[in-house]
């Protein structure tokens, strides 16, 4: 059983829509990373969270420690946001990756 | 400079070849990582170097041999690979091991014939 669960696996949206990707994790995860991977392969770190909320441009990440749940929101989505979004939990031993959410934003 | 640079971007090799993947960062990070990623799967940790010493080896076959010549460089030496080793190999770094943001390279896409 994976200690980090993501949903949905696939997501399609029209340009401009508000998008939410969810991540649930198990006990022992001390911090949560949100990563973005484009088809070319490179991974970009979007956020690292251990509490509260972070915002960068149109991206917002929240984490609820009590519920062991994190969300990544994209406001005013754009076709260039199309990518795989991965949450990864840091369990002090190594990163545990979720299976990723494949997002496609259509114009 | 917030880049992790990986070379080559693409590599095709036969099962008897010896080749190397290289990774470089100049952010002063003291932890560097090799990950393997198969198509449509999340990355799998292979090795972690912390302060130029091997910290974690995730039971990787010996045909993969990591090397950290200095704090900026990380190599992955490949020998006698199998076709199932074909994958995207990602290098990452962080300020210290298991702490802080991870910076990933663009990856080296390896095909073993």
Image (tube, coloured by chain):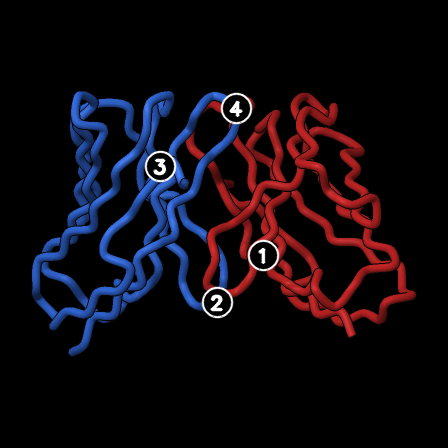
Please name the residue shown 86% across and 67% down the image. Answer: B15
B26 relative position to B113: left or right:
left
Q: Secondary structure at mark 1?
A: loop
When the figure is inspected, residue B77 is found, relative to residue B39, above or below; the finding is: above
Mark 4 closeness class: few <14, some 14–19, many ≥20 residues within 10 Å: few
Q: Give the mark nearer the N terminus: 4 vs 2.
A: 2
Q: Secondary structure at mark 3?
A: strand
Chain A hue? blue
Chain under disc 4 = A
Q: Which residue is mark 4?
A: A93
Q: CA distance from mark 4 to mark 1?
A: 23 Å
Q: Secondary structure at mark 4?
A: loop
Please name the residue shown 35% across and 59% down the image. Answer: A84
Query: Is label 4 in contact with label 1 (beta carbons under 8 Å)?
Result: no
Number of the front mark, 4 or 1: 4
Q: Which residue is mark 3?
A: A33
B84 relative position to A67: left or right:
right
Please name the residue shown 55% across and 23% down the image. Answer: B97
- Please check whether the numbered discs 3 and 4 fall on a single chain: yes
Q: CA distance from mark 3 to mark 4?
A: 14 Å
Number of the front mark, 3 or 4: 4
Q: Which residue is mark 1?
A: B107
- Residue A1, by quadrant, is top left
Q: CA distance from mark 3 to mark 2?
A: 20 Å
Chain under disc 2 = A
Q: Which residue is mark 2?
A: A40
Chain B hue? red
């Amino acid at each position: 059983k994976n200690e980090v669960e993501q949903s949905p696996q696939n997501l399609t949206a029209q340009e401009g829509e508000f998008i939410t990707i969810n991540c649930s994790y198990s006990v022992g995860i001390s911090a949560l990373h949100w990563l973005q991977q484009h088809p070319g392969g490179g991974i970009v770190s979007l956020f690292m969270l251990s509490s509260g909320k972070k915002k960068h441009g149109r991206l917002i990440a929240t984490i609820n420690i009590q519920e062991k749940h994190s969300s990544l929101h994209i406001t005013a989505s754009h076709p260039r946001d199309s990518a795989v979004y991965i949450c990864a939990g840091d369990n002090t031993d190594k990163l545990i990756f979720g299976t990723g959410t494949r997002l496609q934003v259509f114009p | 400079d917030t880049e992790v640079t990986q070379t080559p971007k693409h590599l095709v090799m036969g099962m008897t070849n010896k080749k190397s993947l290289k990774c470089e960062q100049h952010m002063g990070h003291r932890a560097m990582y090799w990950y393997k990623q198969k198509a449509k799967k999340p990355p799998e940790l292979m090795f972690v170097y912390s302060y130029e010493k091997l910290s974690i080896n995730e039971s990787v076959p010996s045909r993969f041999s990591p090397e950290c010549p200095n704090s900026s460089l990380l190599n992955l030496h490949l020998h006698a690979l199998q076709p199932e080793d074909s994958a995207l190999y990602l290098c990452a770094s962080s300020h210290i091991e298991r702490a802080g943001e991870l910076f990933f390279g663009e990856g080296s896409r390896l095909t073993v014939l």
